[in-house]
Image: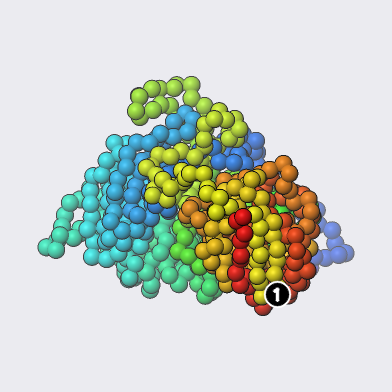
């Protein structure tokens, strides 16, 4: 009996080794199931070699086809916040804004050009979908319609009136076949299929679906994707349940997958967590993987056929806070900038912001997604971070799309460039911005210095028209101020000659009582105390002109001494109403924040504010408030 057991053990070890060499064994498979008991006294001839680090062949060739700029190359405007963006196989870029407007752009050998503008819907967009062949675009809205566009000819071809609000749409046809669109209902678990070119209407004038399924989910479907290689749809409902269904018979496609029951997978990952739900769902070009971004700010990459999690990355605020504590962190920020980014993250959770998505490159070996540090590029094979795009920008990027082709001409001129070079570009929307941004392999300094990277392709708003103002009157420029707080008075000397616009902003706000009752919402001992935000969380406040204004750096004014009064900002040219008072020398802030005052009396009050107890987010447990600010303009 002993010989067969030993032989069986040797064969099992050999089989596991051969499976690993063939690449048919994942990390998760190695940990699952009983293993043969090792015999110390007996040595098998089939020893497992030590695990080697995964390597991606020709990695540099793939990386050379990805954007890598620290700063965005160009930005273009919509009239309202940009919420959706997509890139087609036919070299078009589609952008959608909160007001229901759609814009077509054509990729040029370098950059993009505007093609056409549609007021697609009367209400907010709920979803846009581009077909895999790049021929069709569909847009859905709360106005109970979805519309079909011919991408090549950039023209609207059909309008489908519905009796319900469409939640999510996805094209579910193979290339070369009849275009079919699946549309989920925001108020029921039904998913309906429509012929995109059909004009069939019922008596009420509503579009007639060719199929309706209501036995897959129990709650409304919020996300769907189509895997063309398998001809299946993967959908997610409000409760986080993930389902697979065939586009032919609308049944579970057991023969196309490597599992029979979901208990053998990780597809219950979201359903078992009440507070964690996916907000985006994308599939790789080869159909092997699908990726989600969830409300817990974790990226999860699933193997489509096995339903198991292949990679998972934590991008939560807590993770980044811990990372900032490490001295050797390659992406370390100064405390003011990191505090601002944390405040934006908290604001994201409270607002109905566009979802953050995860995208794959053409090779399906890399993923890209937005974080509070910028847009991360990760190698899925080696499980390594390649770089962070836009790390030096102040915007919080959200929804992104990737272009990796070779554009050979212009729509407007018909010019062809047969020798066109690849111009990999990431297109990104940003939080509360009516612009979208282009990241390429070119830095802004590579351009003509006189050429602005922010393109004003829309007429200026009333607020922007007011930006051209006359030289401030003397009674709008303070020379000194007394800030009365709940802990005492702080006397400040102002510098109207060195930074007139900043001082005017502070003076007018103070005279108008704008700062009255505001708290010192951010206090860091041995660093600074910050105030000036009506919302009290670091995301609010505006200037007296209603828009962000430029910095005013002066060689005589710096942060080399404590008790400096300086403007808080979200990057260059983003000053509003917030300001801070330093408590130690901070020379690294020079030429990053506008110094417009110095504390000349009441330093002990600043120290008292600095000593108050705070929570983990640097917010005082007991409010320290500004009672009022008295400004002297003589």
Q: Quadrant of the N terminus?
A: bottom right
Give the residue at x 73% y 48%: 558
Residue 205 in view, yes or no: yes
The answer to which image quadrant residue 249 occupies is bottom left
**Which residue is at the front of the view, 338 or 89?**
338
Residue 27 in view, yes or no: no
| Residue situated furthest right in the rendering | 41
Percent x, y for residue 497?
A: 64, 45
The answer to which image quadrant residue 126 occupies is bottom left
Percent x, y for residue 429?
A: 48, 50
Percent x, y for residue 597?
A: 68, 54
Question: What residue is pinned by disc 1?
Answer: 487
Give the residue at x 64% y 54%: 479
| Residue situated furthest bottom in the rendering | 622
Q: How is the image coloured?
A: rainbow
In the displayed structure image, the side of residue 579 where residue 236 appears, left or right: left
């Amino acid at each position: 009996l002993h010989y067969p057991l030993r032989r069986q053990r040797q064969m099992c070890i050999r089989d596991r080794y051969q499976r690993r060499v063939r690449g048919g064994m994942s990390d998760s498979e190695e940990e699952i199931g009983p293993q043969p008991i090792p015999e110390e006294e007996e040595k098998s001839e089939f020893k497992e070699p030590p695990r080697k680090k995964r390597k991606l062949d020709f990695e540099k060739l793939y990386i050379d086809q990805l954007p890598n700029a620290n700063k965005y190359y160009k930005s273009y405007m919509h009239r309202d916040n940009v919420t959706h963006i997509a890139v087609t196989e036919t070299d078009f870029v589609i952008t959608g804004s909160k007001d229901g407007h759609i814009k077509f752009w054509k990729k040029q050998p370098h950059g993009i050009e505007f093609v056409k503008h549609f007021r697609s819907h009367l209400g907010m967009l709920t979803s846009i979908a581009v077909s895999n062949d790049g021929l069709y675009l569909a847009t859905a809205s709360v106005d109970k319609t979805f519309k079909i566009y011919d991408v090549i000819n950039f023209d609207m071809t059909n309008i489908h009136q519905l009796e319900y609000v469409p939640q999510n749409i996805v094209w579910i046809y193979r290339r070369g076949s009849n275009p079919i669109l699946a549309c989920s209902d925001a108020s029921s678990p039904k998913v309906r299929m429509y012929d995109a070119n059909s004009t069939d209407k019922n008596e009420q004038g509503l579009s007639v679906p060719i199929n309706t399924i209501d036995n897959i989910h129990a709650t409304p479907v919020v996300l769907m994707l189509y895997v063309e290689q398998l001809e299946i749809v993967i959908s997610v409902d409000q409760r986080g349940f993930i389902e697979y269904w065939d586009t032919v018979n609308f049944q579970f496609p057991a023969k196309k997958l490597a599992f029979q029951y979901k208990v053998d997978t990780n597809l219950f990952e979201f359903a078992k967590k009440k507070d964690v739900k996916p907000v985006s769902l994308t599939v790789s070009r080869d159909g092997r993987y699908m990726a989600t971004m969830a409300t817990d700010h974790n990226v999860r990459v699933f193997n489509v056929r096995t339903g198991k999690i292949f990679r998972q990355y934590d991008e939560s605020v807590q993770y980044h806070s811990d990372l900032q504590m490490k001295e050797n962190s390659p992406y370390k920020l100064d405390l003011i900038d990191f505090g601002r980014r944390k405040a934006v993250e908290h604001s994201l959770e409270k607002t109905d912001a566009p979802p953050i998505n995860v995208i794959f490159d053409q090779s399906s070996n890399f993923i890209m997604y937005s974080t509070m540090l910028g847009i991360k590029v990760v190698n899925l094979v080696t499980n390594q971070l390649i770089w962070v795009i836009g790390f030096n920008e102040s915007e919080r990027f959200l929804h992104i799309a990737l272009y990796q082709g070779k554009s050979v001409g212009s729509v407007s001129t018909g010019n062809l460039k047969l020798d066109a070079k690849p111009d990999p570009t990431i297109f990104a929307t940003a939080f509360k911005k009516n612009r979208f941004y282009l990241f390429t392999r070119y830095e802004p300094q590579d351009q003509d210095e006189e050429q602005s990277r922010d393109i004003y392709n829309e007429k200026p708003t009333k607020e922007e028209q007011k930006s051209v103002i006359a030289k401030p009157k003397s009674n709008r420029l303070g020379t000194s101020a007394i800030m009365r707080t709940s802990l005492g008075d702080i006397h400040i000397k102002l510098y109207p000659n060195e930074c007139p616009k900043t001082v005017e902003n502070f003076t007018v706000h103070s005279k108008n009582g704008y700062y009255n009752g505001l708290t010192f919402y951010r206090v860091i001992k041995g660093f600074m105390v910050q105030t000036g935000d009506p919302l009290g969380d670091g995301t609010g406040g505006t200037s007296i002109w209603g828009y962000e204004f430029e910095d005013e750096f002066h060689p005589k004014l710096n942060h080399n001494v404590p008790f400096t009064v300086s403007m808080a900002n979200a990057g260059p040219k983003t000053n509003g109403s917030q300001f801070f008072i330093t408590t130690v020398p901070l020379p690294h802030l020079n030429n990053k924040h506008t110094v417009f005052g110095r504390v000349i009396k009441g330093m002990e009050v600043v120290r008292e504010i600095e000593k108050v107890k705070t929570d983990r987010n640097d917010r005082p447990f007991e409010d320290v408030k500004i009672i009022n600010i008295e400004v002297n303009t003589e």
